[in-house]
Structure formats: C-alpha cells, structure tokens
Image (cartoon, grey):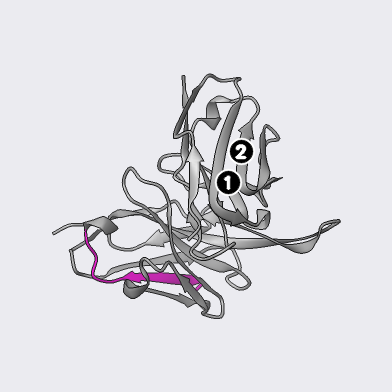
Amino acid sequence: EIVLTQSPGTLSLSPGERATLSCRASQSVSSNYLAWYQHKPGQAPRLLIYGASNRATGIPDRFSGRGSGTDFTLTISRLEPDDFAIYYCQQCGSSLPLTFGGGTKVEIK
Amino acid sequence: QLQLQESGPGLVKPSETLSLTCTVYDESFSGYYWSWIRQPPGKGLEWIGEIDHSGTTNYNPSLKSRLTISGDSSQNQFSLKLSSVTAADTAVYYCARKNRNFYYDRSGYGYYWYFDLWGRGTLVAVSS
C-alpha cells in the first residue's frame, strides 16, 4: 500500500498569504494518478488538481500543483477567505488500494 | 445540482450489515468506476472499494472479507454492503465517480485518473 504523508498537519495563515502544502509518498507515484482535493465540513470533497499539475474545471489559477515521484506540492498563491479548508492528496490508481493523505488543515491565523 | 446521492440507515447495530446505495443523477453510469469512500469522525479519508459499469470490482484489502459492492446500471445505482460492523465502522460514507482524461504530449500518452464527482456523504453510526 502506498502511504501518503501530508505536512504540515495544520497551516495557520492570513488571507492574501501563500500556502504551500506537501504530500510525500512511501513509494513512487505516477503523476498521472496524483490528485488534490479541498474538503469543507458538511460538503462533498472538491477536485482541485489532477495529474499532479492540472487544474480541474472551474478551479482558479491561484491553485497550482507540482511534483513527481514521491514528492508533490499544492500551492495556493494568495489565500482567499473561501480557501480555508482541509486539503487531501490522493493516489488514484498507481497501485491498489487507492489511498489518501492524512490531510492538511489550512486555518485562519 | 445533485448528481450523486447516498441513502441508507443512519444507525446500524454492532455485528449487523451496513447497507448503502448511491444514486447517480443526470450522468451516465457507463464508462466510469464508482467508488465508496469513508471518513471516521476526526480522521481522514479511506477508500473502501469500487465497481465499474460491467461489474468489475476492486476492494480495499483491509475490508475485503466483509465487503460487497454491487451495481445496477439500469437504475443508475451502486451499493455497498459491509458485514459484521463494529464501532470502528462509524463514519461519513461518500460515493464518488472515478474519471479519466486522455492526454497526448511530447512525453507520450496515457490517462489521468481522479475523482471528479462526489456525494455529500451520509453519516452511519454503529451502536446498540
């Protein structure tokens, strides 16, 4: 099983600041299968990034993803009030079982 | 608009079987994988398993011995049955669609895979 470790667990930032979230895999993940999601309480998770660096439909360009192999990063260039949420990385089929990272909570400082 | 909706009992007794159904609205059932994912209180997301339109399934090995996922393409529904539940199975259960996107560039060609549609989730508590 591929274990995804996200860091930090919590990121305390102010609106307008830059957020950098890390996702490290226990073994190499094909970029084709690496996705990022935003999750707010009581809502369905929302796809942000697929293929490690491709923004999903309707996702603003302040969200960007990069990385390969075992190290992936999600960056939010300028936080807006609506961006405070929990973010998960996921390997979506590089191997079974599909796995998620433990999440990074981005909270208002 | 509502595209995936989970339904089923919100309370299940220990040792019994948890049963949920996901209805797919306004979307084709064919050509995709349909997954169940859960989130225990205060914890992260766990993939449970998936089924495609032909009935091919993949299960999380940690749940495989207790798990059955089935589909009914005529009803645009797929279902989850998890037997012999304990308090550890208390969670919000989500259904989701796994989609793929073909790419062709200088590096070659292939598919990106991701979950692009999710239900809002349903809380299932295991308690006597």
Q: Chain of mark 2?
A: A
User: Is B57 displayed left or right of A75 in the figure?
Assistant: left
Subunit that carries the residue with mark 1: A
Region of the chain picked out in magenta, as a range? B75-86
Q: Amino acid at mark 2?
A: Leu
- The extreme right residue here reads B106
Percent of width and height locating residue B9:
28, 62
Contact? badges 1 and 2 (CB < 8 Å): yes
Badge 2 marks a residue whose secondary structure is: strand
A62 shown above or below A39: above
The percent position of residue B116, horizontal first and vertical second, equals 59, 55
Horizontal side of B111 relative to A98 (left or right) equals right
Residue A89: x %, y % from top left = 54, 47
Q: Which residue is mark 1?
A: A36
Say whether residue B107 is magenta: no
Residue identified by numbered label 2: A74
Frontmost residue, A21 versus B87: A21
Would you call the spot at circle 2 few (<14 residues within 10 Å), some (14-19), or many (20 or more)? many
What residue is rendered at 56% in x and 35% in y?
Answer: A21
**Amino acid at circle 1:** Trp
- In the depicted structure, whether residue A45 falls above or below residue B113: above
Mark 1 element type: strand
In the displayed structure image, the side of residue B110 where residue B12 appears, left or right: left
Query: On the rendered structure, is B89 left or right of B25?
Result: left
Marks 1 and 2, how far apart at CA: 8 Å
Residue occupying the point 61% across, 24% down: A18
Seen in the picture, residue A59 relative to B8 is either above or below; the reply is above
Closest to the observer, B78 or A62? A62
Q: Are marks 1 and 2 on the same chain?
A: yes
Which numbered disc, 1 or 2, marks the residue that appears first in the sequence?
A: 1
